[in-house]
Image: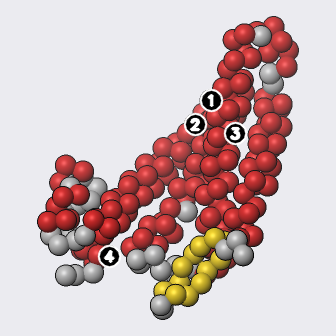
């Protein structure tokens, strides 16, 4: 049986077309369920990377340069920036899966990759929460919102959200480490 990474990279099946790519096909070709799931993970990560870079890049460009500055555009721009940074780090995860969970990028990148992932999680949740609260205030407390909703205040809230997200993500910098097991380097959480 050929190596899984060779199969993914050299396969005549295009893994960008889901109609031609089935989980069962991999199992029938002799790959176990675990290997098939690894291939599916790579496919999903790759699609997320391509669409995420294009989509979030477009949103950032439009909200930064092509639309009038509004409170809503500030929220969307920051949400897109959080997701954009996350998808820029997806190739490291793709490589990690393709290398059978052998981390080739050193301890600093292990920590940074995890830190970016966790920061994205917190920032995305917090920006969606802020956006929802802002929508509620704009609809229910209209007169108060007209006086207090400004682009400058929105940017101050964004700075606070980013600060909270970074602080909450610091454990990824502290506890994430690499270790060599059976000639493989693994990126893992070390809580000891």
> Residue placed farthest to the front in the image?
192
Cβ atoms under marks 1 and 3 closer than 8 Å: no
N-terminal of the pair, mark 3 or mark 4, is 4
How far across and how far down the image is residue 99, in percent?
A: 41, 78
Mark 1–mark 2 Cα distance, whole angstroms, equals: 6 Å
Image quarter where the C terminus lies is: bottom right
Compared to 81, does 8 lie above or below?
Answer: below
Marking on residue 62 = 2
N-terminal of the pair, mark 1 or mark 4, is 4
The residue that label 3 is drawn on is 126
N-terminal of the pair, mark 1 or mark 2, is 2
> Residue placed farthest to the bottom in the image?
183
The residue that label 1 is drawn on is 67
Mark 2–mark 3 Cα distance, whole angstroms, equals: 22 Å
Cβ atoms under marks 1 and 2 closer than 8 Å: yes
Mark 3–mark 4 Cα distance, whole angstroms, equals: 37 Å
The residue that label 4 is drawn on is 5
Q: Secondary structure at mark 2?
A: helix
Image quarter where the N terminus lies is: bottom left
Residue at screen point 55% across, 88% down: 180
Q: Nearer the viewer, residue 190 or 9?
A: 190
> Residue placed farthest to the left in the image?
28
Q: Nearer the viewer, mark 4 or mark 2?
A: 4
Cβ atoms under marks 3 and 4 closer than 8 Å: no
């Amino acid at each position: 049986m050929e190596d899984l990474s060779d199969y993914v990279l050299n396969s005549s099946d295009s893994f960008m077309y889901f109609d031609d790519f089935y989980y069962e096909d991999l199992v029938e070709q002799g790959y176990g369920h675990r290997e098939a799931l690894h291939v599916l993970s790579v496919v999903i990560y790759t699609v997320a990377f391509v669409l995420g870079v294009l989509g979030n890049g477009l949103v950032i460009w439009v909200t930064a340069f092509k639309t009038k500055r509004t409170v809503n555009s500030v929220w969307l721009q920051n949400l897109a920036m959080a997701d954009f940074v996350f998808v820029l780090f997806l190739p490291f995860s793709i490589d990690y899966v393709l290398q059978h969970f052998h981390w080739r990028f050193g301890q600093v990148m292990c920590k940074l990759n995890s830190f970016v992932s966790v920061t994205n999680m917190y920032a995305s949740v917090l920006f969606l929460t802020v956006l929802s609260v802002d929508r509620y205030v704009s609809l229910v407390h209209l007169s108060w919102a007209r006086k207090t909703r400004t682009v400058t205040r929105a940017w101050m809230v964004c700075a606070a959200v980013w600060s909270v997200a970074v602080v909450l993500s610091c454990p990824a910098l502290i506890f994430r480490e690499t270790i060599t097991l059976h000639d493989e380097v693994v990126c893992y959480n070390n809580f000891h």
